[in-house]
Image (cartoon, grey):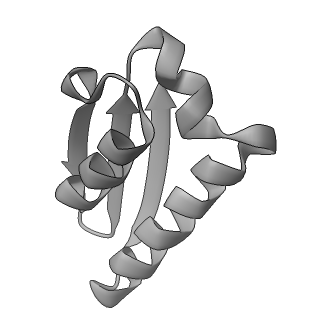
Amino acid sequence: MEKLIRHIAEALVDHPEQVEVHCIEGENSIIIELKVAPDDVGKVIGKGGQTAKAMRKVLSAAATKLKKKSLLQIVE
């Protein structure tokens, strides 16, 4: 999951070397924290939050396979 979000985020931003992904895995849930460069936050969130919403959907589909809930937090 962590690699999936890292790969997507690095493809979207101008500074892929500053992408940081932290995964906190619980018994029934997975929380992924994504941190990017300050000028790349808009690219990751997208117009009206559509890019972030799409990333959350992909993460949710992958988590469903593991029978877990998922949460993507974009940290500034």
How far from the left and from the top, in percent, is residue 12?
44, 42
**Left or right: 35 with respect to 60?**
left
Q: Residue at x 71, y 52 (%)?
A: 50
Q: Position of residue 70 (x, y in %)?
A: 43, 63
What residue is shown at x 38% (from left), y 23% (from top)? 36
Residue 38 at x, y = what percent? 47, 11
Q: In the shown orientation, is residue 51 left or right of residue 41?
A: right
**Across the whole image, how many numbered discs are drawn on residues?**
0
Q: Quadrant of residue 54?
A: bottom right
Residue 39 lies left or right of residue 31; in this view the side is right
Q: As drawn, which residue projects farthest toward the front?
A: 14
Q: Is residue 50 above or below residue 40?
A: below
Q: Image check: 47 left or right of 75?
A: right
Residue at (49% x, 33% y) in the render: 74
One can see residue 4 in this view: yes
Q: Using the rendered image of the protein, determine whether residue 32 is visible from the camera's viewpoint.
A: no
**Residue sitting at x 32%, y 22%:** 15
- 39 or 57: which is nearer to us? 39
Where is the N terminus found, in terms of image quarters? Answer: bottom left
* Front in this rendered view, residue 3 or 23: 3
The location of residue 68, given as percent across then percent down, is 36, 75
**Residue lying at the far right of the rendered structure:** 48
Where residue 53 sits, quadrant-wise, is bottom right
